[in-house]
Amino acid sequence: MNTQYHLAVLHGYMLDKIISGDKVVEGRFHQVKTIPFGRVNEGDVIFLKETSGPVKGYITVKNVKYYAHPSIMTIGEILEKYGDKLCIDQSFRDKALRANYITLIFIDKVYAITPIRISKRDRRAWVVLNPQPTLFPGGEEVWKSQLLSLLAEK
């Protein structure tokens, strides 16, 4: 299976929890079927961008679980089993109970990088990057340029 590359936009405190290793599962809970549902696979690379901020790191994916139209009981079981690993609070739990599509991304490895500002102006919280960039060919400046051009095309 080919590795895919993604850009995930997260609130700073959640991004920091991933970088520190406290958050080991990234979860996306949606009412409508939207990316990343069904698009992330084991071995994929996800770049981590802070909301209104820079890209601060990237992760590799160990495993992914998808749930379509889960019952409230199933969502409760997911939150009970993975809540601590997701680093979610009660207000998020209440919102999660309305989800129709859930993506749980189990993090394999975490890499912090020198923060890179990119020109992302849309409101998407997830972007599948295509074509696939090669990580750091010729150093971070070349990678930054490649990532910028990929995002500019979206």
Image (cartoon, rainbow, N blue to C red):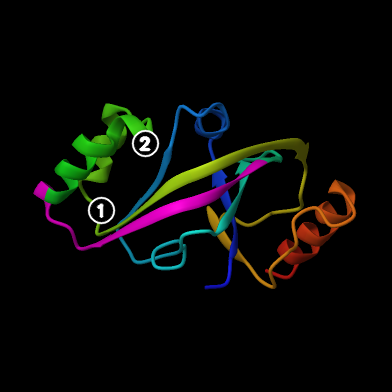
Q: State the residue in front, 16 or 81.
A: 81
Q: Amino acid at mark 1?
A: Ala
Q: Quadrant of the C terminus?
A: bottom right
Q: The residue tagged with tag 2: helix, strand or loop?
A: helix
Q: Nearer the viewer, residue 48 or 107?
A: 107
Look at the image and give the residue range highlighted in magenta. Answer: 57-73
Tell me how far mark 1 sits from mark 2, CA to CA. Answer: 15 Å
Question: Residue 44's x, y, as percent?
Answer: 55, 59
Nearer the observer: mark 1 or 2; the answer is: 2
Say which residue label 2 marks.
Answer: 86
The residue at 24%/59% (across/down) is 100
Residue topped by disc 1: 99
Q: Is residue 64 above or below residue 13?
A: below
Q: Secondary structure at mark 1?
A: loop
The answer to whether residue 88 is seen in the rendering is no
Residue 27 is left or right of residue 4, and the answer is left
Query: Which picture quadrant has residue 129?
Result: bottom right
Q: Amino acid at mark 2?
A: Leu
Q: Residues within 10 Å of mark 1 (few under 14, many from 20)?
A: many
The verdict on residue 70 being magenta is yes
